[in-house]
Image: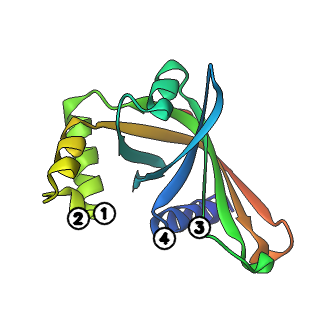
């Protein structure tokens, strides 16, 4: 059963491109939409290291995220609720691998023609979310249908 849920979660992550990441800091809760690339049950994204969500996750890596399309038809709603730990990628080899995954998924990052985009991308940090809990919501299987996938916490 867990393998089946894990496969559906992985497929859902591959079908979508934007997560809404929630952090908590001195100013209260905050959410930001971010493009991501998947490596197993780890998600990578690029972000300005001075952004609010980046600063907050550096102070406390416990985060939550959601991934879903916009639906008007309630029975069609499908989505993921994620919880885990996020961190800035500092290791050069891990950063290079994450950058390759991001650029493969988002080719516009490979050689941005726009000068501002290129400068922002070059100074951006890469972050990693290690998912420890996934809740797959699928109303097509019944009202409020949920399946939970618990993953090991990376240490």
Instruction: Give the x, y percent position of residue 28.
Output: 67, 27
Tag 4 or tag 2, which sits nearer the N-term?
A: 4
Q: Which sits in the foreground, 37 or 133? A: 37
Residue 8 tag number: 3
SS under mark 3: helix
Residue 105 tag number: 1
Q: Nearer the viewer, mark 2 or mark 4?
A: 2
Q: Residues within 10 Å of mark 1 (few under 14, many from 20)?
A: some
Q: Residues within 10 Å of mark 2 (few under 14, many from 20)?
A: few
Tag 1 or tag 3, which sits nearer the N-term?
A: 3
Circle 2 residue: 107
Q: Nearer the viewer, mark 2 or mark 1?
A: 2
SS under mark 1: helix
Q: CA distance from mark 3 to mark 1?
A: 20 Å
Tally of marks: 4
Q: Which sits in the foreground, 142 or 16? A: 16
Circle 4 residue: 15
């Amino acid at each position: 059963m867990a393998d089946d849920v894990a496969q559906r979660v992985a497929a859902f992550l591959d079908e979508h491109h934007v997560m809404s990441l929630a952090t908590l800091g001195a100013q209260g809760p905050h959410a930001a939409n971010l493009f991501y690339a998947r490596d197993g049950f780890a998600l990578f994204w690029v972000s300005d290291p001075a952004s609010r969500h980046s600063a907050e996750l550096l102070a406390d890596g416990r985060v939550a995220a959601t991934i879903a399309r916009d639906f008007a038809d309630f029975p069609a709603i499908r989505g993921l609720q994620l919880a885990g730990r996020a961190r800035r990628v500092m290791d050069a080899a891990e950063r290079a691998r994450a950058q390759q995954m991001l650029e493969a998924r988002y080719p516009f990052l490979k050689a941005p023609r726009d000068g501002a985009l290129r400068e922002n991308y070059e100074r951006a940090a890469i972050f990693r979310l290690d998912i420890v809990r996934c809740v797959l919501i699928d109303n097509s299987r019944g009202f409020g249908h949920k399946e939970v996938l618990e993953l090991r916490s990376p240490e």
